[in-house]
Amino acid sequence: MIPSVQQIIELERKLAVMEDNLKKEKLFAIGELSARLAHDIRNPLSVIKTSINILVSKGDVDAKTMEMYERMERAVERITYQIDDVLNFVKPRVSSLKNTSLDEILASVLARIEIPKTVVMTTPTKNIEFVGDIISLEIVFVNLITNALQAINNSGEITISADVQNEKIIIKIHDNGPGMPSDVVPKIFDPLFTTKQTGTGLGLTSCKTIIEQHGGHIEVESAVGKGTTFVVTLPYRRII
């Protein structure tokens, strides 16, 4: 007996639901395992970082040794960044809405990121005061700015602009890097998808979750040879 069109549609729907549930189960298992590993790694990593800071602070080492310490510091920072990616993905949070401003958030973010002298960083001239979860929004902008730095290989231009339109805050982070092929752009927010050898594929997924928990959305505009722009749209909740 040949199935009807309606039966075929219903079967496709059920298969799509099963596939989605299987994907969620796999991601949950990966997330639980990753979270345990991340917590276990944090303690020894903290010991290493503290030890390096002590060695660097002595100041009585030769240039070659200091260069080695600096490489160790950068390695620790890379591992810490990847651990944060995992934990932010496993346990995204938007729990504390407070009065804040774009200037305040970006100042905190840029203080945590080392911006090379070979990068021209342009920040918004217009400050926007609003209500949001400060910690989670900082996670978003640390990820987006770090991605931009990696895209331009720490040499180029990053421009952050912001405006309020129709009761929405629109923030754009543009880099003049090589851009992304059209087949990559639709996948960029998918869990575990990454174009970087050292990436976790979870950072942008966490950004998307956090922005959506704020009632907003995030999009990416990119083309090869034209750079990349991430567009974050948030509801304009005024100061309480």
Image (cartoon, rainbow, N blue to C red):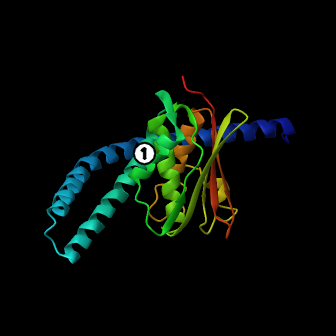
Tell whether 154 sits left or right of 50: right
Q: Amino acid at mark 1?
A: Ser
**Is 70 displayed left or right of 128 in the figure?**
left
**Residue 116, picture quadrant:** bottom left
Above or below 83: residue 1 = above
Near-viewer residue (141 or 196):
141
Q: Is any atom of residue 29 visible in this view?
A: no
The total number of labels drawn is 1
Q: Which residue occupies 64% across, 56% down?
A: 229
**What residue sits right under mark 1 in the picture?**
108
Answer with left or right where residue 163 lies relative to residue 66.
right
Residue 154 versus residue 110 in the image, above or below: below
Residue 13 lies, in percent from the top left, at 73, 38
Q: Nearer the viewer, residue 61 or 151?
A: 61
Residue lying at the far front in this picture: please name it: 125
Q: Quadrant of the N terminus?
A: top right
